[in-house]
Image (tube, grey):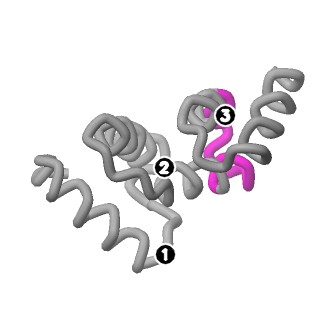
Amino acid sequence: FDKAKRIYFQVVADHPDNLDALKKLFTIEKHKPESLDFIAISNKIFKIEDNSQLVVEEINKIFKEYLVITNSSAQLDTPHMVGLAIRFCNHGFLQD
């Protein structure tokens, strides 16, 4: 996992909005939700600006998993939470 983590962190350093690499890091780090890496990766995912239906759908899935993992205590600043709420509503995820 450490080698994979280093590789994916390098991919994200070179391509900050690479959702595939960020999802892999989320999967690696989700077993340590208190870690700074988990918080940082989650926040990077939630701040991706791509507004396409497929990307917002993926972010929505990850956000729901994140809330379960963290017992609904999202560590994201208010403007970004509002932005996510608006994006989710605009893409048909009203209940989320």
Res 89 → quadrant: bottom left
Q: Position of residue 51 (x, y in %)?
A: 33, 52
- Which of the two discs, 3 and 1, labels the residue nearer the N terminus? 3
In terms of secondary structure, where does tag 1 sit? Answer: loop
Quadrant for the N terminus in the image? top right
Distance in Å between CA atoms under marks 3 and 1: 21 Å
Q: Position of residue 73 (x, y in %)?
A: 44, 60
Residue segment shown in magenta: 28-39
Visible in this render: residue 68? no
Tag 3: amino acid: Leu
For the residues bearing labels 3 and 1, Cβ distance under 8 angstroms: no
Visible in this render: residue 73? yes
Q: Which mark is residue 25?
A: 3
- Which of the two discs, 1 and 2, labels the residue nearer the N terminus? 2
In terms of secondary structure, where does tag 3 sit? Answer: helix
What residue appears at the point 50 percent right and 60 percent down from the top-left corner? 47
Tag 2: amino acid: Thr
Tag 1: amino acid: Asp
Closest to the camera, between mark 1 and mark 2, is 1
Distance in Å between CA atoms under marks 1 and 2: 15 Å
What residue appears at the point 67 percent right and 28 percent down from the top-left corner? 28
Q: Which mark is residue 77?
A: 1
